[in-house]
Amino acid sequence: MQSVCSSRLRQAALAATLLVVAFGPRPVEALDLFARHQVTVQFATSDGKPMANAEVRVFAPGEPNRPALTGRTDNEGKFEFGADRDGFWSAEARSGGEGSRCRRSGFSVCS
């Protein structure tokens, strides 16, 4: 009887863990406790179509060669992140596959 209960408990714990991983917040959506500003950048192609699911790299002020964070845009080409300091930030989005595209954006964050 004890091994059956133990087995069911392990199965329930595994199922709960899988649900959290599958439906929990992705890194882009996670709350950043040290962020001073919430920033949303939207990327689009030259003809105005959203760059959905594009790979994004964000660069902090004074660190143009080292990504501060990475992620992917949503279906509308938007990428949201918490900026932990004021200054000039930049971001780039790349969509792969046929007709690969790259877009860059620079923006100031200040209090």
Image (cartoon, rainbow, N blue to C red):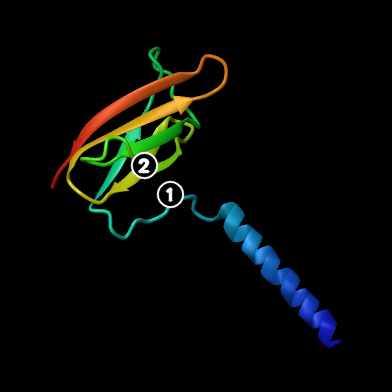
Residue marked by disc 2: 80
Q: Is residue 29 left or right of residue 37?
A: right
Q: Earlier in the sequence, mark 1 or mark 2?
A: 1
Q: Give amino acid for label 1.
A: Glu
Which residue sits furthest right?
1
Q: Residue at x 73, y 73 (%)?
A: 10
| Depicted 82 relative to depicted 18: above or below | above
Q: Give amino acid for label 2.
A: Glu
Q: Quadrant of residue 1?
A: bottom right
The label number, if any, that marks residue 29 in the structure image: 1
Q: Residue at x 53, y 24 (%)?
A: 96
| Depicted 14 relative to depicted 8: above or below | above
The label number, if any, that marks residue 54 in the structure image: none
Q: Nearer the viewer, residue 64 or 55?
A: 64
Q: Is residue 63 left or right of residue 52?
A: left
Q: Is residue 79 left or right of residue 60?
A: right
SS of the residue at dot 2? strand
| Depicted 6 relative to depicted 85: above or below | below
Q: Is residue 58 left or right of residue 63?
A: right
Which residue sits furthest bottom?
2
Q: Residues within 10 Å of mark 2 (few under 14, many from 20)?
A: some
Q: Position of residue 101 (x, y in %)?
A: 45, 19
Determine contact: label 1, label 2, CB under 8 Å.
Answer: yes
Query: What is the C-alpha distance between the residues marked 1 and 2?
Result: 7 Å
Q: Quadrant of residue 109?
A: top left
Q: Position of residue 89 (x, y in %)?
A: 24, 37
